[in-house]
Image (cartoon, rainbow, N blue to C red):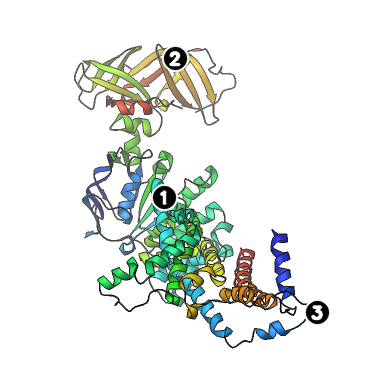
Amino acid sequence: MTLLFLVPTALVFAISFKPSDPWGGIGAGWTLDTIRSLGNPNYPAIIWRTLWISFVTTACCLVLAVPCGYYIARAPQRWRRLLLLLTVIPFWTSFLIRIFAWKVLLHPEGHVKRGLVAVGLADESTMLLYRSEAVLLVMVYTLLPFAILPIYAAAEKFDFKLLEAARDLGATQWRAFRQIFLPGIQRGLLTAVLMVLIPSLGMYIIPDIVGGPRSEMIANKIAQRTFVDRNVPHASALSAALTLAVMAPMLAVLLGRRRREGGR
Amino acid sequence: MGDFLQFNEVTKQYGALKAVDGVSLHIRRGEFFSLLGPSGCGKTTLLRMLAGFERPDRGRVLLDGEDITDLPPNKRKVNTIFQNYALFPHLTVRENIAFGLRVARVADAAIKQQVDEMIELIQLGAHANKKPHQISGGQKQRVAIARALINKPEVLLLDEPLAALDLKLRQRMLLELDQIHDQVGITFLYVTHDQGEAMSLSDRIAVMHEGRIEQLGTPAEIYETPHSSFVAAFIGDTNFFDGRVEALTDKDYCRLTIEGFPPALCYNDKRKQPNELVHLSVRPEKFRISLEQPTLSPQHNLVEGQVQEVVYLGSQTKYLVKVQEYLLAITQQHSRFLLDQRPIKWDDRVWVWWHADDGYMLDRYREQDEALMEMPAH
């Protein structure tokens, strides 16, 4: 795995420092032009959008996944199996098909739009598709199982007697949940953050299909540089920057985890 | 005084199973009270209803005159020591003990002072900043006690608190619990299936069976005068005889015929009439055993048998003696030891006797208690 991961990553980093040739290939010699091109004035807005969509997606997923994980873990055994099955059932349908399904739903003639108009929450001219909120919605939908599963796994190992102990010592239900349950499933929460945040930062297909020109994310720019501009070194530089951005939170979590375990 | 803690006609049903079936119980202030019974007898459900984790289907729970039946657990002035302590794994010993005070928004300085006192009381000063997984079982036990007592509860609930400890530690913790009870003087409600723990600690014991209280009394009352075959078999060892009252010999005694055993004289405090079916229960230590035929008063029963097994235990010896169709379990203390006296050995013919007052008549047990009766009596 190290080989399959490290070698391509190293190649991407190396190509970042190559000049491009007019035929879409990679020129000879070394240059810093590509790095300079990262200063393109369009990028800060796109990077900012990528970050906020990713973080909001992560936050939404956690807020939804924690109660889900809690209830699945507390459900009786046969219910638990069914609920877990329901959680992973979307994976049986192709990712792409599910996104197109959302496109159909959110379409001006789609059921969601019609329903909202019918109950008076939207008027005919409201555009649901091709905006950042649509990207956000579909991303939360897509990534939610990746948050539920690790949180459930941690909650399942959690000793629910501890919540009774906290209640017995005078804590309200909410306080017991916050001060005893959440710290108890900390590992699951961290895993869920990584499992949602990292794919979010590199998400390409969802903004491409349900997003519009003003909801582009960084990965769309990389694709554009590669396939439209045929400027591979430039795309590589962007990719390298993204890789570094993704590695940062991962390393922070790993270091944090190691420090805590060292303290045990 | 008997109405400090009350369960009034409390019932709890899980599906078809009646976990607690119309239990009424009055516990005095400051008492060390035990609920004793086999697993599934309803004792833990009763405790959880007092803690507030279960709501009775019918009946009320009263604490110091106040109806607490519908109060949530955090509003009750009771604290629990859980079976596996339920210490918070991410908090240190000190933080665990302070939890209740923090929740109650006690000032930091006061918390520090009270926690320090508690840590000193349980002698865990050296471990105050360790996490629960870094300390031993006995230490966890003490932290759990401190964490509960620091809130100054009206009643301390103990749910099989010694079950997770090994024998030696259990005996030491028994003494410590007894001392703590004497020191703090609050009411203890102790749930256990171990009759030894209940007997040695309690002021009073309620023996529970199938959701009901079989008998309530002091340890001595329960041991010496069990109300049912179940209680007699569950508390300590005993020998059961299936008998029928043959005749009343005088106003206090009656003669029993026992199939496969010689007839026996028995104290008749239950006023049994001829032809009633009864159980005769005789505790192993009530028998006397000897190689020579003794001379006895007419209030004694004397039978002859053959030794099947001898187990020497130092302070006492256990014998299994075959008398006609019965195998008697007998324990003898060694009051004196004479080297030249020939000890009783396997296969010896022996004389066994007991005083008519030491046999105890009980109603015939129910079918479902049969399994308990078959437990070997040693």
Q: Helix, strand or loop at disc 1? A: helix
Residue under label 2, please give it: B322
Q: Which residue is mark 1?
A: A80
Check chain identity for marks 3 and 1: say if they share one: yes
Three-letter code, disc 3: Gly
Q: Earlier in the sequence, mark 3 or mark 1?
A: 3
The amino acid type, in three-letter code, at marker 1 is Arg
Residue B166, image x, y percentages: 53, 44
| Left or right side of A118 for B173 | right
Q: Is residue B179 left or right of residue A222?
A: left
Viewer-proximal residue among B328 and A257: A257
Residue B96 appears in the rendering: no
Circle 3 Cα neighbour tier, 10 Å, few/some/many (<14 / 14–19 / ≥20): few
Mark pair 2, 1: CA separation? 57 Å
Quadrant (top left/top right/bottom left/bottom right) for the C terminus of chain A: bottom right
- Expressed as whole percent of the image width and height from the top left, the position of residue A98 reads 45, 61
Q: Chain of mark 2?
A: B
Q: Is residue B5 above or below residue B107?
A: above
Labels 2 and 3 in the same subunit: no
Asked if the residue under mark 3 is in contact with the one under mark 2, i.e. CB atoms within 8 Å, the reply is no
- In front: B68, or B333? B68
Task: State the residue at coordinates (45%, 19%).
Answer: B289
2 or 3: mark nearer the eye: 3
Q: Rate crowding at label 1 as few (under 14), some (14 to 19) or many (20 or more) other CA atoms within 10 Å.
A: some
Can you identify the residue that label 3 sits on? A29
**Does mark 1 fall on the same chain as mark 2?**
no
- Find the distance from the CA under tag 2 to the CA under tag 3: 104 Å
Q: Taking B66 as reference, is A126 above or below it?
A: below
Quadrant housing residue A235: bottom right
